C-alpha cells in the first residue's frame, strides 16, 4: 500500500519547499511533470534518451559549449530558480557576461524546474524580458 498523507501541504511545508499555489494547482503541476508506473511508483516525465546525455555532461562537462556562448546573436534570457543547485547565480552571471545581449532572471521560491516550482514568477520574468 502506498502512503498517501493528508493530501495537502502545511504552511511549514509550503515555506520550506517554496510552494506557491493552491493544493489543486500543486497537484496539477505534479501530475503534468510525472507519470505513474504502478500503484505506488511515480517517476518524472523525461525522454529516456536525455538521461544518459545529462549524466555524461555532469560527469565530464563538454568545455566547448562555453566557447560558443559569444556566438549567440539574439536577445537572451537565462532564467534560474533561486534555490537551483543545477545552475547557481555565479555560473548564470558568467554565462550572461559572454552573451552579447543577455539578462539573468532569478525566480524566488523555485529550484531547477522554475516553470513548475513557481509558474507565476517564471511567467513574470519572461514577460518582463519580452516587454
Image (spheres, rainbow, N blue to C red):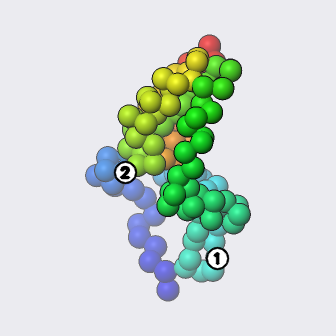
Asked whether, in this view, residue 111 is left or right of residue 101, the answer is left
Which residue occupies the extreme bottom position in the image?
1
Image coordinates of residue 70 in percent, x first then y, are 60, 25
Res 78 visible: yes
Image coordinates of residue 88 in percent, x first then y, are 40, 40
Camera-side residue of 13 and 84: 84
Asked whether, in this view, residue 99 is left or right of residue 112, the answer is right
Q: What is the secondary structure assignment of the residue under circle 2?
A: helix
Which numbered circle lies on residue 82?
none
Vertical relation: 33 (above or below) 63 = below
Q: Earlier in the sequence, mark 1 or mark 2?
A: 2
| Among the 4 quarters of the image, the one containing residue 5 | bottom left
Which residue occupies the extreme top position in the image?
131
The residue depicted at 43 percent of the width and 36 percent of the height is: 91
The residue depicted at 55 percent of the width and 79 percent of the height is: 40
Task: Report, in whole angstroms, how far the alpha carbon at label 1 lies from the one at label 2.
Answer: 25 Å
Q: Which residue is mark 1?
A: 37
Q: Are marks 1 and 2 in contact (CB under 8 Å)?
A: no
Report the number of discs: 2
Camera-side residue of 29 and 48: 48
| Among the 4 quarters of the image, the one containing residue 76 | top right
Image coordinates of residue 95 in percent, x first then y, are 50, 31
Q: Which residue is mark 2?
A: 17
Tell me the quadrant of the picture where the C terminus can be found: top right
Asked whether, in this view, residue 91 is left or right of residue 34, the answer is left
The residue depicted at 48 percent of the width and 23 percent of the height is: 97
Q: What is the secondary structure assignment of the residue under circle 1?
A: loop
Which residue occupies the extreme left position in the image?
12
Res 11 visible: no
The residue depicted at 51 percent of the width and 42 percent of the height is: 114
Mark 1 neighbour class, 10 Å CA radius: few under 14, some 14 to 19, many 20 or more? few
Mark 2 neighbour class, 10 Å CA radius: few under 14, some 14 to 19, many 20 or more? few
Amino acid at each position: 500500500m502506498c502512503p498517501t498523507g493528508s493530501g495537502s501541504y502545511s504552511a511549514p511545508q509550503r515555506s520550506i519547499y517554496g510552494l506557491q499555489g493552491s493544493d489543486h494547482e500543486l497537484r496539477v503541476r505534479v501530475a503534468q511533470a510525472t507519470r505513474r508506473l504502478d500503484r505506488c511508483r511515480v517517476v518524472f516525465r523525461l525522454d529516456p534518451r536525455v538521461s544518459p546525455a545529462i549524466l555524461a555532461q555532469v560527469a565530464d562537462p563538454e568545455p566547448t559549449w562555453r566557447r560558443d556562448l559569444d556566438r549567440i546573436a539574439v536577445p537572451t534570457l537565462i532564467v534560474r530558480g533561486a534555490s537551483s543547485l543545477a545552475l547557481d547565480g555565479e555560473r548564470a552571471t558568467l554565462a550572461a557576461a559572454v552573451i552579447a545581449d543577455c539578462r539573468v532572471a532569478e525566480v524566488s521560491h523555485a529550484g531547477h524546474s522554475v516553470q513548475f516550482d513557481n509558474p507565476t514568477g517564471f511567467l513574470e520574468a519572461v514577460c518582463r524580458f519580452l516587454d
